[in-house]
Every structure is written in C-alpha cells, then in structure tokens.
Image (cartoon, rainbow, N blue to C red):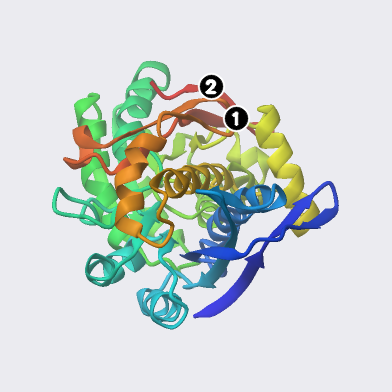
Amino acid sequence: MKLIIKMTATLIAGGLLATASAAETVSIGVIGMMTGPGAAWGVAGSAGVRYAADEVNANGGLDINGTKYRIDVKVYDDQYKASEAISAYNRLVHDEGVKYLMTMSSASTMALKEKIESDDVLLLTSAYSSKIIDPKTKHIVRLYSTPRDYVPPIVSWMRKHIGGKKVTLLYPNDETGWDFVEFTAKAFNDAGYNISARELYERSQKDFLPILTRIIATKPDIIDLGPTSPATAGLITRQLRGLGFSGQISALGGSGPKEIVAAAGAKAAEGVINMLYADPNNKEFKRLKEVFVKQYGQEPNELIVPYYDATKVLLKAIKLSGVPKNPQTVRAALKNALPMQSLQGETMTFGGMNTIGVDAQIMSVNYIGTIRSGEPFVISPVK
C-alpha cells in the first residue's frame, strides 16, 4: 500500500494552479493499480476523480446548504493485490475517516466487501465480478455500465460484421477473469459462435508463446482477450501475429487501444476490436486528455472518463443529500442525481436491475471500437 497522491483544492488546467478556500472537507479515497500491469487504468481513473474534484474546488468548493466543502482526493496503490487494498482501506476509513471510496479490481473489491457492508461508507467501483453486488448489497454501487451490458451487443455486432465460427477465450486467472469467462462464453454461444478453448494465465505472465502455440493449434477464427490489461493485451497480440495468427483479435473487457498499439506495434494491432469508454474525437474528452498530458506527459487510458463522470454524479448526490457526512443518505440520493449528462454529452441513468438484480449502477454509454493505422476508431455506440 502506498499513498500516491493527496489532492486538496487544486485546479490543473491550462497550466494554471488555482486554490479554493473552503471551511469544510469531503474526502474521496481511491484504491487501485497505480503500478504494474493495470497501471494505465489506475492512473487514468484516479486522475479522472481528481480532475472532477479540481473543477468543483476551483469554483469555491461544493455548496451544501450554504456551506462550502473542499473535495480532498487520496489515491492508494494496491498493485492489483487484495492484501494491499485491505491495508489502504483500513488507513483511509479507520485512520483518516474517509466516507467515500472508489475501487478498481474485482479481487480487491471482493476482499473489501464484508468490511464495506459493515462500515459507514459508500463505495463506487469499476470492478466487474458479479459477486460484488446483489439485492442485499447496501453500500456498493457500480460506477459505469459493465461487460454484462455491452459485451452481448458487441458480440452480436461481431457476428454480423466479422463472421467466423470458432472462438478462444484467453483471460487472466483471477476473480475478474473467472467471472468474465462465464458470461462472455454465453454471449458468444448465443450469437452462434462455438467456444473452442478457454485458457487462463497469471497477471504477472510475460511469455505467452507456449499457451498461444496451443491455442493456434485449435485453429480459432477469433481470440478474445477479455479483461486483459492493455499492455499485456498488446504483448499477446504481438506474439500471436509473430506466430502467424491472422484471425480476429478482440479485447472486450477493458479499453486501452493506445497501450495495445504501444506494446504490439501498429501493424500487429491493426483491426483489434476493443470496447471504448471514450470517443477520441469528442471535444470534452480532448479537453480532459490535454489536462492529463500536461501533468503526465502521455495520453490517458479512457478509463479517465467514467471515473470523472462517476465523481460528478457522487458529488451531485452528496449535495442533494444535504448531509455530506452520511454515506447512506448520499446512497439514497444517487437515484435523484440521475439522469445526468456525461462529459461526452451522453445521458447517464441509474439502473442495473436487468443485469444485477438491483438498481445499484450508473448506466453509462460505451462504444464499439477498433484500431486503424495505430489509432482508436469509433465504429458506433453500443446499442
């Protein structure tokens, strides 16, 4: 566990730093993978939280019943490890009194679930596992639309436009991968594909040649990498092309086309199908991207968008609740904070009943994307 960033009332935009004065503070703790295989997701997601908070602070803070509250964001690195997430959680909640939290990985969130449900906190998470939220869950909300919402329509689109018959699923051997393989296999089967193989690998793995050689021998038409982290997806793509695989590669579980290209090379990555959180040509996304580039010297993973949007929804709910120190009153106010316009101008709603059995999810808009000449390209919104 490592505290990466503590942000209090700073605006990073146009190269300027502005300080807002506020008598009270509302803290948001972010626990995610800031180093290691998922760092592209973690750094971008946490930046989205900070930038949303920055904008509120630059306007004097969050006005709740006439009192201005500064938004304080604290980011901890869990290194994709449940043990590190537990340490970070204990520090944030029990030592620092943080009431509002965000987590990223399924393994970390599952390790924290019992604590979250027994503590006086509210968690927004991007974790995929179906075990995280059920009708009895009171303190956890998913912060965006999940693969259960967008994978089936993307697979249906692939069936119409890509074709093929045999699909191999190559996913990480962890809570996210185990959950993902079940409903993705169903989505492909329902669309008329045959699953020729299901393979799992360790997140720390670098050499995929033995497993890829075995996969190619089954002659799949499509290899889906699911929730593989972007850099690893790029590595696998490069090794697949090096072994002579010329079929379709997809990575439906998490966006990261830039990182895929960086690891695979533009030629190898050409045509990879990837879910996108952002339209790269959207004006507001470009604005947020410029802020990130000025701070980090590189472009952000698109996960910056749903975390930015979720923070805006959370802050609106806190304001509507009128009781910023009461997470359960804020949880009840979430449904009143939505519908709401996202950064990119799409409409976010509150739902989840159809896929998780309870309304405990911000329903966001995703895009079907591909890689063309080394750049992400939006084919269409997911419908």
Q: Which residue is mark 2?
A: 379
Q: Is residue 246 above or below residue 173?
A: above
Residue at (36% x, 51% y) in the render = 330
Q: Amino acid at mark 2?
A: Ile
Q: Residue furthest front?
A: 66
154 or 26, which lies in front? Answer: 26
Q: Nearer the viewer, mark 2 or mark 1?
A: 1
Q: Which residue reaches farthest top? A: 160
> Label 2's element?
strand
Q: Is residue 374 visible?
A: no
Amino acid type shown at disc 1 = Asp
Q: Position of residue 288 (x, y in %)?
A: 69, 42
Earlier residue among tags 2 and 1: 1
Residue 53 lies, in percent from the top left, at 61, 53
Residue 343 at least partly seen: yes
Image quadrant in which you'd find residue 212: bottom left
Answer with the quarter of the image where residue 164 lies.
top left
Q: Choose between 231 and 216: the one closer to the eye.
A: 231
Around disc 2, counting alpha carbons within 10 Å, would you say few (fewer than 14), some (14 to 19), or many (20 or more)? few
Q: Residue furthest right?
A: 15
Q: Secondary structure at mark 1?
A: loop
Q: Which residue is mark 1?
A: 279
Q: Position of residue 125 (x, y in %)?
A: 38, 54
